[in-house]
């Protein structure tokens, strides 16, 4: 007579374990996606106006965005018009619609790293911050041309974090933080992602701040 309650308790424990496991997995995916729900402006249309702290790194060339829309009327180069349209859509938060525009631009200018980085970011933003294999390939293309590409390094770091590689992700981001200096957009973006990686490797906030400040 007592076996039925015992079996029910065992089943209840199994369901509790399954629920806990699924909740943890869902929370991890949610953290990665929630980073991008704030709709911050894309890095590929941001103008870096401060001096970088590394002589080996040049400020990234921003993709044409809203401010360059007048050029679209006079553009003779087809790739430029597609890039401007794609950049404008990306800048106003319509990342998914910017993807085909940037793809057209790349077909006409396949070696342009700025376009590849922009497409990678558009794919990432359209997928709520998740770095797909396709987006990763775009960033890797840019890094083959320029290993110091700041935007590609940032998103490869995000891919590393999302794939259980918090330590190398943090190393990349701390290096970026030392490089970009006082640029507010970059500072804000990096501090959105670095604490999650630091927590995974057991580094507290004060230590992380010290790591970012050293060498600057």
Image (tube, rainbow, N blue to C red):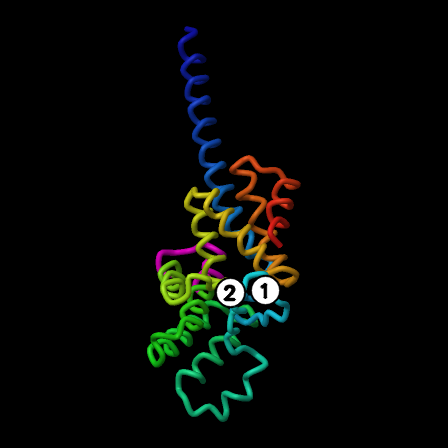
* Residue 76, x across and y down, in percent: 43, 92
Where does the image place residue 186, in percent across and percent down from the top left?
60, 60
Q: Are marks 1 and 2 in contact (CB under 8 Å)?
A: yes
* Residues at marks 1 and 2, CA–CA distance in whole angstroms: 7 Å
Q: Which of 16 and 187 is in front in this view?
A: 187
Q: Earlier in the sequence, mark 1 or mark 2?
A: 1
Which residue is at a point 52% across and 73% down the rendered structure image? 62
> In the rendered view, would you say 162 is above or below 5?
below
Residue 16 marker: none
Q: Which residue is drawn at 64% across and 46% down?
A: 209
Up the image or down, 148 lies above or below 166; here it is below
Query: On the picture, is 214 further left or further right than 131?
Result: right
Q: Was residue 130 drawn as part of the magenta stretch in this picture?
A: yes
Q: What element carries label 1?
A: loop
Q: Which residue is drawn at 56% across and 39% down?
A: 199
Q: Residues within 10 Å of mark 2 (few under 14, many from 20)?
A: some
Q: Position of residue 74 (x, y in %)?
A: 49, 93
Task: Name the side, left or right, on which 212 lies relative to 57.
Answer: right
Task: Check disc 2 and report its element: helix, strand or loop.
Answer: loop
Query: What residue span does the magenta drawing correspond to?
Result: 123-134
Q: Quadrant of residue 178?
A: bottom right
Front-most of 210 and 77? 210
**Viewer-proximal residue, 147 or 122?**
147
Quarter of the N terminus within the rendering: top left
Q: Name the residue beneath numbered marker 2.
A: 57
The residue beneath circle 1 is 52
From the viewer's perspective, is 168 left or right of 205?
Answer: left
Image side of residue 137 versus residue 58, left or right: left
């Amino acid at each position: 007579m007592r076996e039925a309650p015992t079996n029910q308790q065992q089943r209840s424990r199994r369901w509790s374990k399954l629920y806990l496991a699924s909740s943890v997995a869902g929370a991890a995916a949610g953290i990665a996606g929630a980073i991008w729900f704030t709709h911050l402006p894309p890095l590929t249309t941001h103008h870096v106006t401060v001096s970088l702290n590394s002589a080996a790194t040049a400020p990234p060339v921003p993709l044409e965005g809203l401010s360059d829309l007048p050029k679209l009327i006079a553009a003779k180069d087809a790739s430029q018009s597609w890039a401007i349209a794609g950049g404008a859509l990306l800048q106003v938060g319509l990342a998914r619609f910017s993807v085909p525009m940037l793809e057209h631009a790349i077909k006409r200018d396949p070696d342009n790293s700025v376009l590849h980085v922009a497409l990678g970011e558009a794919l990432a933003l359209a997928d709520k911050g998740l770095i797909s294999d396709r987006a990763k390939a775009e960033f890797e293309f840019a890094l083959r041309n320029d290993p110091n590409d700041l935007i590609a390094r940032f998103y490869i770091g995000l891919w590393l974090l999302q794939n259980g590689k918090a330590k190398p992700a943090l190393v990349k981001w701390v290096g970026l933080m030392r490089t970009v200096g006082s640029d507010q957009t970059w500072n804000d973006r990096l501090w959105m992602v670095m604490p999650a990686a630091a927590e995974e490797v057991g580094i507290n906030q004060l230590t992380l701040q010290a790591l970012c400040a050293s060498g600057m």
